[in-house]
Image (cartoon, rainbow, N blue to C red):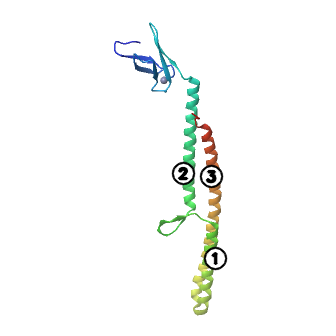
Amino acid sequence: MKTTMQTETVTCGGCGAPLSIPDNVEYVACRFCQAQLHVQRNQSVVFTEVLQSLQKQTERLADNTDVLRLQNEIAMLDREWDQKSSELMIRGKHGRVSVPDKTSAVVGGIFLTLFGLFWTVMAGAMFPPMALFGILFIIFGVISCVKVHTNAERFETLQATHQHQRNELLNRLRQAEPRD
Ligand SMILES: [Zn+2]
């Protein structure tokens, strides 16, 4: 519809939204659906023709939805990984966090056990009741070795699973991403 002002209202051929455009333009992009429109004028009617095929627009929109969904899935997977892995992390002094690994589990366990043995032998020779602490050290050494070792194993499994799932999502994301 032409108005007396220098703008006119046309209907987007892509999404049907009413667009207010200057009455001298021939090409315009819909601000709702981004369709490239060719404004056609003849004596009585003004209408728009979508230059880019609607089909392609819909495909692109679907692509974007896939991309967004995959990006969200990756973010969720990473959050899940952060949470699960931090449960298995070893918290040292000064808030230092380290990944549990099997070697340090065994080395730490052996160290504590040897210290316990040494203590037990020494205390046994000098003041037998103190030998009890040595035995506690041995028990503590074995338990912590098993615990860290188990955590290290779970950590490795989780990490492998996470990497695998993440790579799969990344591949799908690469395929879903628009090529242009
Ligand atoms: Zn539109």
Residue 50 in the image: state x and y as whole percent: 52, 20
What is the distance, in whole Å, between disc 3 and disc 1 at their CAs?
Answer: 32 Å
For the point 64% across and 46% down, which residue is it? Answer: 168
Q: Which residue is mark 1?
A: 110
Residue occupying the far bottom of the picture = 126
Residue 144 in the image: state x and y as whole percent: 60, 71
Is 64 on the left-hand or right-hand side of 142?
Answer: left
Q: Which residue is mark 3?
A: 163
- Check the image and report above or below for 129 versus 17: below
Q: Quadrant of the C terminus?
A: top right
Name the residue type under label 2. Answer: Arg
For the residue carrying disc 2, how many other residues have a C-alpha within 10 Å: few (<14), some (14-19), or many (20+)? few
In front: mark 2 or mark 3? 3
What is the distance, in whole Å, between disc 2 and disc 1 at their CAs?
Answer: 35 Å
Name the residue type under label 1. Answer: Ile
Q: Which residue is mark 2?
A: 79
In front: mark 3 or mark 1? 3
Quarter-wise, where is residue 64 in the image?
A: top right
For the point 54% across and 39% down, which residue is it? Answer: 68
Nearer to me, 143 or 11: 11
* Disc assigned to residue 101: none
Q: Is the CB of the residue bearing disc 2 within 8 angstroms of ligand 1?
A: no
Name the residue type under label 3. Answer: Gln
- Count the marks: 3
Pointers 2 and 1 in contact (CB under 8 A)? Answer: no
What kind of element bears circle 1? helix
For the point 34% across and 12% down, which residue is it? Answer: 4
Residue occupying the far left of the picture = 5
